[in-house]
Amino acid sequence: MSRILLVEEGHDAASVLLDELRRAGHETEHIEDGAVALHRILTSPPALTLLDVELPRVSGLQILEKIRARSDHPIIMLTALAQESDRLRGFELGADDYVCKPFSPREVAVRIGTVLRRYAQRQRVARPGMPITFGAVRGCAILDGHYLPLTRRESLLLRALSREPGKVLTRSKLLEAAFPEALDVNERVVDTHIKNLRKKLATVSAAHDWIRSVYGVGFAWESQARQDA
């Protein structure tokens, strides 16, 4: 059983979701105030936090930013703000997932399970034995003992992605990593290089999707096969 913290103003809005999480076997806690929630996460972190954006005293995005400065604690953002820019801001600050209101409580429960599995995988990968290394020669990478010939852009992208396994990096972040000297490059060029990278990574294991796509946002590095696949 995992302890899930729901940070959302208003008991009525939270009750249906809390009931669903309890049915799914989770222990739950509900906090309505942003400042109280921040203190609780820092001093007694739950397994995962469901975090509304609009909160009293301290906003959800402020909480996310402060938590990410200290840990990679799993956080799913809940918001009525459906603009792409709002979602991108959350992912750029380090959110593990983003759910827009109105949402299905059952869907949120499924997403919690997925994020918790990814977090457990990320913790394993963070220990010694990460399967990818980069050689001193530019364009050289070794993944699970397999040599990968890479272009300079592919190498820079792969370094950025593999540095933080499981974390979603937006196209703009990946563009900065792969084209640090460029001022006018379309973000969609990242997709082209990712496509080429995937072909090369498939030579190591065609069955494993090394680079996970997050629709409308960006990509994340998956070092090990996902248990929810």
Image: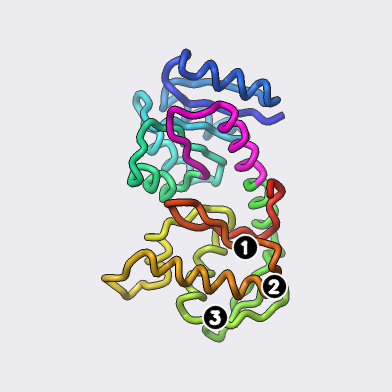
Question: Residue 124 appears at what percent x and percent y?
Answer: 70, 53
Q: Front-most of 173 and 189? A: 189
Residue 63 figure quarter: top left
Above or below, 144 against 219 in this view is: below
Residue matched to label 1:
210
Residue at image coords 37%, 46%: 89
For the residues labelled 1 and 3, the Cα–Cα distance comes to 15 Å
- The local secondary structure at tag 3 comes to loop
Q: Check whether the beta carbons of the residues at disc 2 and disc 1 lie within 8 A of each other.
A: yes
For the residues labelled 2 and 1, the Cα–Cα distance comes to 10 Å
- The local secondary structure at tag 2 comes to loop
Question: Residue 104 appears at what percent x and percent y?
Answer: 53, 28
Q: Which residues are magenta?
A: 96-117
User: Magenta segment: does it hold 109?
Assistant: yes
Residue matched to label 2:
204
Residue matched to label 3:
150
Three-letter amino acid code at the position of disc 2 = Val
> Would residue 181 be visible to someone looking at this image?
yes
**Number of other residues with Cα within 10 Å of mark 2, as a class: few under 14, some 14 to 19, many 20 or more:** some
Above or below, 91 against 61 in this view is: below
Three-letter amino acid code at the position of disc 1 = Trp
